[in-house]
Image (spheres, rainbow, N blue to C red):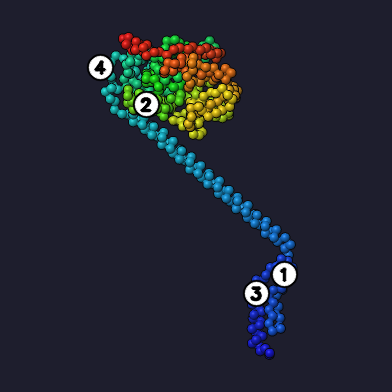
Amino acid sequence: MKRTPEDIGIFQVLALAEAQKPPRIEAKGVYRVGVFKRSGIAITATELEVSHYENFDERVQQLKDKLADIEAQHASATAAAEQQRQEMDSLKSQLLESTMEVQHLKDKIAEMQDMQVTDLEIEADASYDGPHYTGSCTPDFCQYLMTYQTHGHLLPKKYAKSIILDTISLLKGASTLVEIEVPKEGKITVCGDIHGQFYDLLKIFFLNDLPSEQNPYVFNGDFVDRGHFSTEVVLTLFAWKLALPNHIYLNRGNHETAQINGIYGFKQEVIDKYGENLYDLFCEAFRLLPLCHLINGAVFVVHGGLFSKDDVTLKDIRKLNRYCEPKGLQGSEALICDMLWSDPQHCQGRAPSKRGGCGVGIAFGPDVTERFLRKNNLKMIIRSHEKKRKGYETAHNGKLITVHGPSTDGRMRGAYINLDGTMTPMFTSFDQVTAEDIYTVRNSG
């Protein structure tokens, strides 16, 4: 068949269009593209060359692996950024809550300080012949206060409030860890839990003499709860602290916390005797109490015990923010709860507290005591927190002593410890003051 010029033009257009299509890449070699055949006439487009890929599949896999690494790094960075954001949000929330709590407490104290004084706060009545607190506390006032309370009289609210406020002002300048120096020829007395047993406190003073510059005392926490005269005990101790600030030392115990006071009686006792606003002031004072004392750089005095980890130093303790109601969840509050709640055990190592629950410290063995003493270059630990048959007990190879007041049921004796300038302990045990004795004293005129 004869092709017309129009037919030849069509073939050329088709061949040119085929030649302009993208080349088809093969595994290797040189090849032609755009070949168009029709009616025995072949029209060949431009010859193209493609690079020779001998390891093409391997190269593709490398690129895939690299892409996967980049995606993994991106995912990891995204997760880390999200975790940091969550931690920052949590810290901001905690800071805000702490700031609000502190401001609330400041506002509440200011409100109580500015509130209108009631008739009870001015004077109990015209016939009141008890001690008058004028803002300057002396040993004579303390003795008068003890005598007045011994006969069952209640200090007027005005004076009780002033004693607590002055104690708060004094404790604000105290350290979390207070250091005490006892001269070689001197002595110091360490007392354990009093637990509202006012007449047992008086018995200690009777047996061991009243506080003075030559006769200093450390009261190792748990002044309140369980007994019926917690307000009398704590007002007496606060008064002596004001009279002899460098010779009366007060540690915080687990019963100087609001949660425990609400369970074991102190809160209700204060409300019944003085009203709830005075209870809030007591709580403020308790939050400011030191957590421990160090005598002559050798004897560590703490209410409960040691920590759930080995690396705690005296420097770490000094840095603790004691102004809190500790719940023991994390950070400094966990260390504070250990100091208020932990108990020794006879076996080595650590174990969960026998008291159960969260924020009640741990049980720690003699090896834990030894490591803490060695790390901090100490000689001995004195703690309280547990009743003992003789009122005291020596454990952990003689390096840990427990001292406690009489049990409220009278079945266990009380004790106190005298330390001389060489930090050698001497123990004195005594029996609980009986209800009959209290009745006799309160009605003796």
Q: Is residue 242 visible?
A: no
The foreground one among 186 and 343 is: 343
Marked residue nearer the N-terminal end (2 or 4):
4
Residue 427 position, x and y percent, is 51, 12
Marked residue nearer the N-terminal end (3 or 2):
3
Q: How many numbered marks does the figure carry?
A: 4
Q: CA distance from mark 4 to mark 1?
A: 120 Å
Residue drawn where x is 36% and y is 12% of the image: 436
- Residue 216 vs 50, above or below: the answer is above
Q: Around disc 2, counting alpha carbons within 10 Å, would you say few (fewer than 14), some (14 to 19), or many (20 or more)?
A: many
Residue where numbered disc 2 is placed = 267
Q: Secondary structure at mark 2?
A: helix
Q: Secondary structure at mark 3?
A: loop
Residue where numbered disc 1 is placed = 49
Q: Are marks 3 and 1 in contact (CB under 8 Å)?
A: no
Q: Around disc 4, counting alpha carbons within 10 Å, would you say few (fewer than 14), some (14 to 19), or many (20 or more)?
A: few
Q: CA distance from mark 2 to mark 4?
A: 29 Å
Q: Secondary structure at mark 4?
A: loop
Q: Around disc 1, counting alpha carbons within 10 Å, would you say few (fewer than 14), some (14 to 19), or many (20 or more)?
A: few
Residue where numbered disc 4 is placed = 126
Residue where numbered disc 3 is placed = 20
Q: Amino acid at mark 3?
A: Gln
Q: Around disc 3, counting alpha carbons within 10 Å, would you say few (fewer than 14), some (14 to 19), or many (20 or more)?
A: few
Q: Amino acid at mark 4?
A: Ala
Q: Are marks 3 and 2 in contact (CB under 8 Å)?
A: no
Judge left or right: residue 78 versus residue 153: right
Residue 189 position, x and y percent, is 48, 14
